[in-house]
Image (cartoon, rainbow, N blue to C red):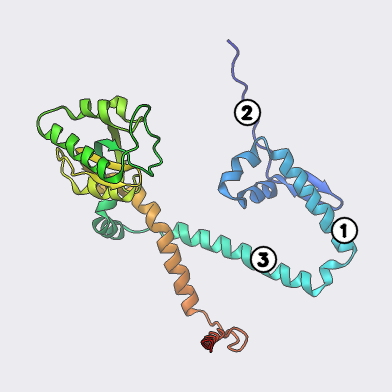
Amino acid sequence: MMASPVPAPPPSSDKVLITVGDQTITYAQFESIIDGLPEQYRAQARGPNRVALANQLVRVLVLAQEGKRRKLDETPAFKTQLMFQQANVLASMAAEQISKSGAPNEADLKAYYDTHKADFEQVKARHILVRMQGSPVPVQPGQKDLSDGEALAKAQELRKRIQGGEDFAAVARSDSDDVGSRPNGGELGSFHKGQMVPAFEQAAFAMKPGDLSEPVKSPFGYHVIQLESKESKSFEDARAELANRMKPEATTKAVEELQKNAKVVMDPDFFAVPAPAPPAPAAKPAQ
């Protein structure tokens, strides 16, 4: 069995990787450029797309040097765009630093958890679907395309059979129009809020374990739901998710506070909101 090759150590930070004319890019600069890319592109830029990125940088530097030769860097347009680009980069770096330093404290996390407990609930349920006309679920071979009223009546009848002692899973396997869950007796597994259509979700989360719902209408048809369990993440289990949720809010508040305290003046004439146009006069009736 061959041993896995040992990856080569990274070059020194000052090692020159790219030279274009009299301009160079070191390993440290190359890494810094990659760090400025959106996170989803960084791994590729350090791996299979490394040469493509280098070629792109060469193209940029070649064109930039040509721009200098043409003295484009002395134009007002260049100076204005350079000012804005520098401000944009600084703003991104400042926002990132604010986000990292603005981690919510324990009291904030607990307060957020207490007011959003419902977001951390999950339920486990089964269902039986009776499709109706207009449903995106296809009609099963040999079955009638039921009207809304016929579908509701069938769902009510199936519910009565289960209330009368028939096994929910057996009825789902024989009568549900949901071909995905039907082989498993209507089993949907566990789900959080936001994963199901609103009407289904609202009904399921309002139930208690063991409850059997009245028929619930959705765009797919009528559902008869059996709730198997309901659980809620503890504060400790939800801690990481809480922090991720609260960071953007904390960053937004910090930036809003900076804007509020900054001395900002906007020309009132140039940025005035135009008054709405007066309504068109009503047409005179024909004589």
As drawn, is 169 to the left or to the right of 177? left
From the image, tell me which residue sits under label 1: 66
Can the viewer see residue 233 in this picture?
no
Instruction: State which quarter of the image contains the N terminus.
Output: top right
The image shows residue 251 at horizontal and vertical percentages of 45, 63
Lower position in the chain sequence, tag 3 or tag 1: 1
**Few, some or many residues within 10 Å of mark 2 (<14, 14–19, 20+):** few
- Calculate the distance from the C-alpha at mark 2 to the C-alpha at mark 3: 36 Å
Q: Residues within 10 Å of mark 3 (few under 14, many from 20)?
A: few
Residue on which disc 2 sits? 7
Q: What residue type is labelled 1?
A: Glu
Front position in the image: 243 or 123 = 123
The residue shown at (67%, 66%) is 86
Vertical relation: 281 (above or below) 161:
below
**What label does residue 92 carry, if any?**
none
Look at label 2 and name its amino acid.
Pro
Q: Name the residue under label 3.
A: 86
Q: Residue at x 48, y 69 (%)?
A: 255
> Residue extending furthest right?
69
Q: From this view, report whether residue 260 is shown above or below residue 250.
A: below
Q: Distance between the residues labelled 1 and 2?
A: 38 Å
Percent coordinates x, y for residue 248 in the rendering = 43, 59
Which residue is the extreme one toward the left? 164
Name the element at disc 2: loop
Q: In the shown orientation, is residue 107 left or right of residue 140?
A: left
Do we see residue 132 in this rendering? yes
Locate residue 84: give its quadrant.
bottom right
Label 3 amino acid? Gln
The answer to which of marks 1 and 2 sits earlier in the sequence is: 2
Circle 1 SS class? helix
Q: Which of marks 2 and 3 is nearer the N terminus?
A: 2
